[in-house]
Image (cartoon, rainbow, N blue to C red):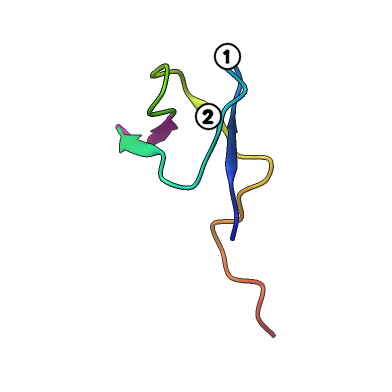
Amino acid sequence: MNSLTCSRCDEETNRPWFHNGKLYCPSCYEEVRLEDYQVENEHE
């Protein structure tokens, strides 16, 4: 499963909050990085 890492508290979450087109950490409410998260499926 893909996970997102928060840029502030460095928590990983599989259930970020989605608001105004961005994803936020449920722990500290900062925007989470998308580097480890693939929106599109990579199935061939």
Is 33 left or right of 13, judged from the image as shown? Answer: right
In this picture, residue 44 sits left or right of residue 37: right
Q: Residue furthest left?
A: 19
Q: Main secondary structure of the magenta part?
A: strand
Q: Residue at x 65, y 80 (%)?
A: 43
User: Is the residue 27 above or below the residue 4 in the image?
Assistant: above
The image's mark for residue 32 is 2
On-image quarter of the C terminus: bottom right
Residue 1: percent from the left, percent from the top? 59, 61
Q: Secondary structure at mark 1?
A: loop
Give the crowd class for mark 1: few <14, some 14-19, many >=20 residues within 10 Å.
Answer: some
Q: Residue, x 61% and y 49% (percent of image)?
A: 37
Q: Marks 1/2: CA distance?
A: 8 Å
Amino acid type indicated by mark 2: Val
What's the amino acid at mark 1?
Arg
The magenta segment is 20-24
Residue 21 painted magenta: yes
* Residue 6 locus on image (x, y percent): 57, 26
Return the residue nearer the eye: 33 or 26: 26
Residue 22 image point, x, y percent: 41, 33
The numbered dot on residue 17 is none
Check disc 1 and report the residue beneath it: 8
